[in-house]
Image (cartoon, rainbow, N blue to C red):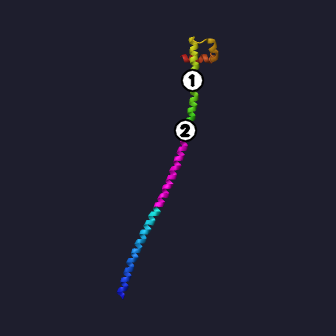
Amino acid sequence: MPYLLLSVGIILLIYGGYLLKKENDVNRSFQELLDEQNRDKGDYVKLLAANLEVKTRLDSLETRLEYILDRLDQIHKSASIDSDWDTAANQAGTIEAGVLPEKITKTSLNMGRGEVRFIQSLLKK
């Protein structure tokens, strides 16, 4: 009888070890599942942070683009004003060359004024 109890005890110990090993395997797979979910959450947090950074950079680029477009508009407007001055200077040159009648064009270009004469003398230099 003691041998029977001893063998039943050993069998129970082996069976208990088997059950503990099986439970550890289940816990290990459950722990892997939890780690994977935490990793996914970390990935989502990283993606959200990257998304926020991209949005801020896009906003800064948008403001820079607006600034550049405004500057281009200003340059375009000043270029059109400069081209008006160029045409006036060309007309003044044609008047001095005697191609156009002086009386008509001098009054339209304000060539009788002193500052216009001064500018013409600077252009000749």
**Mark found first going from the N terminus, 2 or 1:** 2
Neighbor class of circle 1 (other Cα within 10 Å; few <14, some 14-19, many 20+) is few
Crowdedness of circle 2 by 10 Å Cα count: few (<14), some, many (20+)?
Answer: few
Q: Which residue is mark 1?
A: 83
Residue at 50% in and 52% down: 47
- Asked whether residue 32 is drawn in magenta, I would say no
Query: The residue under label 2 is which amino acid type?
Result: Leu
Q: How many marks?
A: 2
As measured in the structure, the alpha-carbon distance from the residue carrying label 2 to the one carrying label 1 is 26 Å
Give the image location of residue 60, x and y in percent.
54, 43
* Residue at the spot 48% in from the left edge and 58% down from the top edge: 40
Q: Is residue 41 left or right of residue 15?
A: right
In the rendered image, which quarter contains the N terminus? bottom left
Q: In the drawing, what numbered circle is on residue 65?
A: 2
Asked where in the image residue 98 lies, by quadrant, the reply is top right
Whether 54 is drawn above or below 91: the answer is below
Magenta-span inclusion, residue 59: yes
**Residue 116: x %, y % from top left:** 61, 18
What residue span does the magenta drawing correspond to?
36-64
